[in-house]
Image (tube, rainbow, N blue to C red):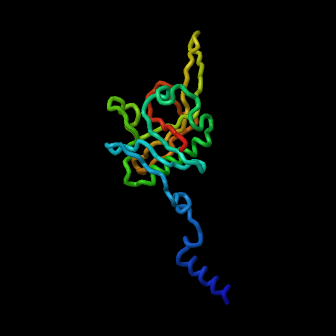
Amino acid sequence: MKITFSLLIAGALTLFYPSAIISTPAQTSTPRNVNFNLVKDKRGNIIAIKNLTIDNRRYNAKFVYGTFNEIFKNSTTTLFWENQQTVQRALNAINIALNARKGATTKIGVIPRNELSNVGSGNNFMIPVALERIVRQYGKEPTENVYVNGVLSSFDEKQKTWGNYSFDGFSVTPDTPFMFVKLEPR
C-alpha cells in the first residue's frame, strides 16, 4: 500500500511538476548559492569579483587596465599560467558571475578617457595564459615579437550577456594597454 501511494505521488509530481523530479539544464547551469560579490567603483563600473569559485577554490578577480608588463611586472608566474583548461574554467566562472546580476552595469574596470576607443570601452577583458615569441623573416632581416596569449570575454550588446569571445590565437603585445583579469587566491 505504501509503495503504491508513493508511486502515485511521484507520478503526480512528475505530471504536474516535472522539475521536482528531473533536473533541467536551466537548473544545473546556474549556481544556487551565489556567494561572490561584485565590487563597483563610484561610477558603477565593476572593478572586482570577490569570493569567486574556480575548481572548488575561492579567488578574487580584479579588472585592471594597463599593459601586461605593468600589471604583472614581466612575470610568467601569473595564476594558472600555461594552463589553458583552468583559465577557460576561470573565464566561464567570471562570465557566470557577471551574468548573474542582470541589473549590473556592463562596464568593467576603469579605463582612462583617452584610451576608450582602443579597448572596447570596458566591454571586454582578457585572462593571460602564456607568452609566445614569434620570429618572422621580412627580407633579409628577421623580426622577433613577443605576444601575450590569453582567453577573452566580451559583452554582447544584443544578448545583454558576457560570453567567451576567445580563440587559441588571441594575443596582444606585452606593452599594449588592455583590460586584464588578475586572479588572486583567497
Q: How many marks?
A: 0
Question: Percent position (x, y) of residue 177?
Answer: 43, 29
Question: Percent position (x, y) of residue 124?
Answer: 44, 39
Residue 19 against residue 130 in the figure, above or below: below
Which of 123/127 is in front?
Answer: 127
- The residue that appears at 40% across and 36% down in the rendered structure is 120
Residue 47 against residue 24 in the figure, above or below: above
Judge from the rendering whether residue 163 lies leftward or rightward of residue 132; answer left or right. left
Q: Residue furthest front?
A: 186
Residue 89 against residue 119 in the figure, above or below: below
Which of 35/158 is in front?
Answer: 35
Question: Percent position (x, y) of residue 19?
Answer: 55, 70
**Which image quadrant: the N terminus?**
bottom right
Q: Residue furthest top?
A: 140
- The residue that appears at 46% across and 47% down in the rendered structure is 162
- The residue that appears at 60% across and 51% down in the rendered structure is 56
Question: Percent position (x, y) of residue 24?
Answer: 56, 65
- The residue that appears at 53% across and 40% down in the rendered structure is 184
